Amino acid sequence: MLTSKQRAFLRSMANGLEPIFHVGKAGVTPELTKAVDDALEAREIIKANILDNCLMDTRDAAQILAERTHADVVQVIGSRFVLYRPAKKPVIELPKAKKE
């Protein structure tokens, strides 16, 4: 689970990213899930786009992909969403969470 500070940090990183996946009429397929899983391992943070012909809501598609890939939904804006999952050897260093 990401803190609000970590989420804000990741949102700022994703601002300059272009979507590398497009969810179309077929929705969230096993092939798309595998490709997103591989991309998250390589990049840690990805941006995806929901096409107009997709019958799914953007938030639903993001949540389904996040659950299937064990990622966190960082942001959903319009027809785009951002997912984050640390790699086995993390490259992105998140701000530390405060201890209570």
Image (cartoon, rainbow, N blue to C red):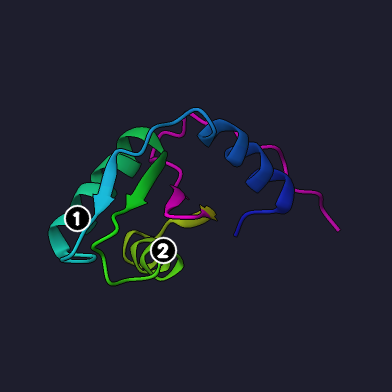
Q: Residue at x 45, y 52 (%)?
A: 81
Q: Image height check: is 66 above or below 41?
A: below
Instruction: Determine the residue located farthest toward the right in the rendered image.
Output: 100
Q: Position of residue 80 (x, y in %)?
A: 43, 50
Label 1 Cα crowd, 10 Å radius (few <14 / some 14-19 / many 20+): some
Question: Within the magenta stretch, is there residue 87?
Answer: yes
- Amino acid type shown at disc 2: Thr
Quadrant placement of the N terminus: bottom right
Q: Position of residue 42 (x, y in %)?
A: 31, 34
The residue singled out by tag 2 in the image is 58
Q: Quadrant of residue 15?
A: top right
Q: Image height check: is 8 above or below 32?
A: above
Q: Residue at x 49, y 55 (%)?
A: 78
**Quick one: SS at disc 2?**
helix
The span picked out in magenta is: 77-100
Question: Within the magenta stretch, is there residue 66?
Answer: no
**Quick one: SS at disc 1?**
helix
The residue singled out by tag 1 in the image is 32
Q: Quadrant of residue 8?
A: top right
Quadrant placement of the C terminus: bottom right
